[in-house]
Amino acid sequence: MCFLLLIFIITGCGREKGFTLKHPNILLVSVDTLRADHLKCYGYPFETSPFIDSIAERGALIKNAVSVSPSTLPSHTSLLTSLIPRKHGVVRNGYILSNNLLTLQKILKNEGFTTAAFVSSYALSSNFNFNQDFDLYDEKFDKNRYPGQQKIERAANKTTDAVIKYLKEYSAKKPFFIFLHYIDPHWPYSPPPNYSRLFNPSYRGNFDGGMKSIYSLRSKLAKGETVSDEDKKQAEALYDGEIRFVNDQFKKLFSELQSEEKLQHTIIVFTADHGETFFEHDGYLDHSPRVYETTIHIPLILYYEPKIKSGIKINKLVSNIDIAPTILELAGIKIPDEYEGKSFANLLVGENEKGSNREQLYVFSESTRKAPYLENGVNEYLLKAKNKWPNDPFAKSIRGRKWKYIETPYLGREEFYDIKNDPNERNNLINSNDNRIKSEIVRFRNLLDFYKKIYVPPAVKYIDRKSIENLKSLGYIN
């Protein structure tokens, strides 16, 4: 499920409040469920992200960044371990991270960092051991955000205020690593009142963005009933309001960093864990069941004025498992051999893309469940089979610069797209008679088979009843 911002303060020759830091401070902000093409810097026509766009205009825009999973906990675990889910074992939301994982925060802690996390959703609760290697883990969820529901989320303004308070009180003479997670764009789509009508002020229907409205809409889809264009537009408009709210909260945090003199020699990296689909494929509204571009194409923006050329656009393919190695290289810390991702720091200092080592890279992505309202014609044998890997029946893809192959075993479906010329995945080429395309399909099938042979024993599923109910209320599990 997310959206990430990393701030590095390179202070090897700089000073912060009277002392010299050996390594940069790092602030990683993850905004849940933010798809790349709903930011204006990625071509969106509406003003959802003016402050984020301003960073993109002054820094590097990575045009082809892809997530390995369209689910919150698996994707975030990949982000912080530089491993695909088949290697770290966190199959789906609600599973427990192993203590044997070499997390980014563990490496930074060993290098002398103070580590802190501020999370805004129960999906990243310490109950799932996501808090490992953090000195401080702030998960104070807002009991009043959604009346009648349990304390499972926290709004962006309250999370921002908690981080600002921490920064104001921070006095340690060593670098900090802060992981900051915003949940707001994730459903329910409930932006604050002054953001709820920004993008569709004329709407007069009954869709309010709450979970009851969402489930009602999905029920219509399951029954084959028509969902009005007005309701579809309103769902996206409320989602956009959430993005704009987070944009403004990040601006507030950025201003605080400036006032605290913590932005000297600053590198900013901005990305997401996954996106959201609004009726584009099979008419569904969701993220976890599919690996289309709407759910796995994520924003990634980098800014560092002394080194990154203003306005540069990088076309190379990047995965979110590449972020942790890049952080370490930029911070001057050795990248461990266990990390699967590849640093792209060389592209940020002006290396010619044609000379980079990323030309033949591919990104493997894997969904974590079936779409509960698209089950007609499902091969139940596949769903009940004792697979070595629990997600084997579900959608998975291999994404390159030009081609993308998708396999969905439980639907008996294969898809192949020229993603460079058909970014919306409208023209399925799987039955093409073109010999060149046929050859590419075989090659991508073989690549996917290679990844399907990789697996570790899945992490332990958390079976506490309260946790199950909390995850259900968020729509994370059926």
Image (cartoon, rainbow, N blue to C red):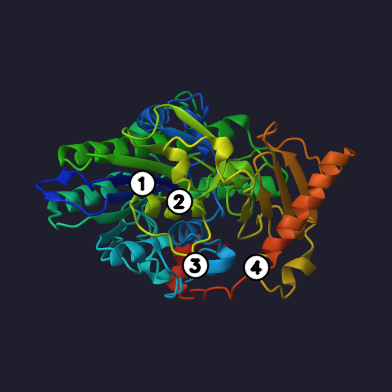
Callout 1, which amino acid?
Leu
Looking at the rendered image, the disc whose residue lies closer to the viewer, 3 or 1, is: 1
Mark nearer the N terminus (4 vs 1): 1
Q: Are marks 1 and 2 in contact (CB under 8 Å)?
A: yes
C-alpha distance separating marks 3 and 1: 26 Å
Is residue 432 among the parts visible in the rendering?
no
On the image, numbered disc 4 is attached to which residue? 454
Give SS at disc 4.
loop
Few, some or many residues within 10 Å of mark 3 (<14, 14–19, 20+): many
Q: Nearer the viewer, residue 232 or 70?
A: 70
C-alpha distance separating marks 2 and 4: 21 Å
Callout 4, which amino acid?
Ile
Give SS at disc 1.
strand
In percent of width and height, residue 144 lies at: 31, 53
Q: Residue furthest right?
A: 433
C-alpha distance separating marks 3 and 2: 24 Å
On the image, numbered disc 2 is attached to which residue? 323
Residue at left offset 49%, top offset 62%: 339
Residue at left offset 74%, top offset 40%: 417
